[in-house]
Amino acid sequence: MKKKLLLFTFIFFSVQFSPVVSQTGPGGVQSSATNMLWLDANTSVALAGAAVTSWTDRSGNTRVASPNAVANRPTLVLSSVNTNASINFDGTDDELRVPDVAGLDLTAWHWFILVRADVQKNYNAWMVKGDDNQENYEMLSFNDGNTHTPSRYTDGSRSAPSSAGGQVTTTEFNVIEYSYTAGAAAVLGRNVFKNGTNIFADAINLTPTVNAMDLYIGNEKATTGRFINGDIAEIILYNAPLNAARRNIVNNYLSAKYNVATATDLYLGDLAANGNYDFEVGGVGQSAVSGKYVAGDNQSVSSAVTGGLDVTEGANAFGNGEYLIFGHKAGANFIDYVDIGGMSAGPLVARWNRDWYFDWTNISGSESADLTFDISDGGMTAVPSAPLSNYKLLYRAGTTGAWTEVMNATSITGDRIFFDEVPHTRGDGYYTIGTLDNTISPLPIELLSFTAHLNSDKVDVAWTTASEKNNDHFTIEKSRNGVTFEDVYTVSGAGNSSTIINYFEIDQSPYTGISYYRLKQTDFDGSLTYSHIVPVEYNPHGDPSISLFPNPADVNSPAYLELSQFEGQEVLVVLRDIQGREIYSKVIVTLSNNELVALNHDGILSKGTYLITASSANKLYSKRLIVK
């Protein structure tokens, strides 16, 4: 199936008038109190070229994974798995470390990691808290692709079992899941799963020993030969095992996102026939499964992790095996004035373009759900207003056709519009919110589009709004690194408008190399929203290139790498032998358009063939060097 990627930064809002608090973890499963770490290669990855300089977690605990040195930086790979990104570790010296904190010192846990081995080797250390003498928790794989989960316990014992081979493969990404808890015989011990299927279990009932060491990703502390050669796309860590319902929902979130088949597939919205609604999947539901995992439910999902829709179990609660799993298609939200067939007549009928596929699973009674549309989490601005009868919950069975108005809004609080006790009787299909008067009762929009394109030696910046409410002005911003931005131009907004408006400005002085542009929108009350970020590459002296001379080179003479047209960029230069072993690496900040790098300094190169790579701005350049 074909799926798309869009990166978001999320804001948390609690549910109003609800007995539970919406969960902001992956798939809407738990929040920062129990979700200790959530690393997603699609978000919060800082780069020097393609090299990862930091990876910030989404759990709300503000933990950061970073390399110990420049030489230890792994590489971000875009569109690596089902159009999602992954981080590649070269098996030689790449690693990331999360500093030790009490929240990562665990005596029980449940974690998920999406991995692929590029090369099978003994002691591919995917994630380790500790070293070889006092690991708290860890997972490694070996030459046959088995999973190895040793732990040490407070009584000084150590157990290091392995699953059968073939779990971590070189051909595809898989969800590897690992939990531990001590307790009653039915649920104690370790359990390891591959794509939802149990591949190892034991009945260990001891307390793991904690330590003051960093959490290593891609290596094990102070232990030779354990750098992984492979890719990690996502890591999710909880401080206790999940109940059966929550575990199923996280697996469905990962399955839809990465197109990985799981043993507990409850969501059909990610199929091509249903439109590939596989982005920001979340769910509520309940399971009375006993044995490996205790019974339980997941009662609510925050709009912060679903693109604007908060779902909570209604007064008619779900029963055993009953779920509502939902997701939307990647892409910016906007106001749709065209695809509104079936809606009642009104002064200015419109709807959110973003809709969600609902998969109601095993629903047999009168179960219901409370739905809340959050304006800001849906990528919009301003505040909705009465009358409630203007706001409609919309449904249709297919991706096209007339909409059915299910019910009117039941309340409005701040920028949140509530529809309580929505029955499941409509069945699977597509749900969104509409208004009969987008002027009086708006579904305000920030942008239809935002673009930045190089035009000769200037950058054309354009954006389009479909409607505006209380919009004071726009600010075009640009950045060299995608983190620190400066103002380029300020443009007055339309204040309040319900018609399409096109804006256009020109940046007369773009940065050399990669620039990152975004649009800031400011309301009359000073509140801010931002667009997505658009990269633009400007090379006034031509495209970057590398060359080697002399080539072939003499073993006793210098060999040089020339970097052309990289001025003002960070370039990571890596020299490897024909077996792939790293001989030399260095990050070079280029000050001119033609930089020379000495490769054969201090006699480091013997006779043979070498590969030189230079990476910058997510592009890779390579040459082969022969030394005689």
Image (cartoon, grey):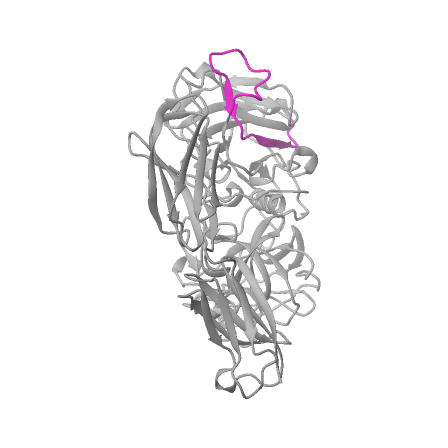
Is residue 453 rendered to the left or right of residue 258? Answer: left
Which percent across, then down, holds residue 97?
45, 64
Q: Is residue 622 visible?
A: yes
**Residue 423 image point, x, y percent:** 57, 23
Instruction: Name the foreground residue: 540 vs 364.
Output: 540
Q: Quadrant of the N terminus?
A: top right
State the residue at coordinates (48%, 60%): 49
Please state the horizontal and vertical placement of residue 455, each as a whole percent of the image.
48, 44
Which residues are the magenta region?
336-364
Name the residue located 52 percent from the left edge and 17 percent from the top edge: 407
Q: Quadrant of residue 622?
A: bottom right
Give the camera-side residue of 195 and 366: 195
- Magenta segment main secondary structure: loop
Residue 254 lies left or right of residue 563; in this view the side is: right
Say if residue 125 shows up in the picture. no
Instruction: Please identify the quadrant where the C terminus is shown.
Output: bottom right
Against 523, is 408 above or below?
Answer: above
Residue 443: x %, y % from top left? 44, 24
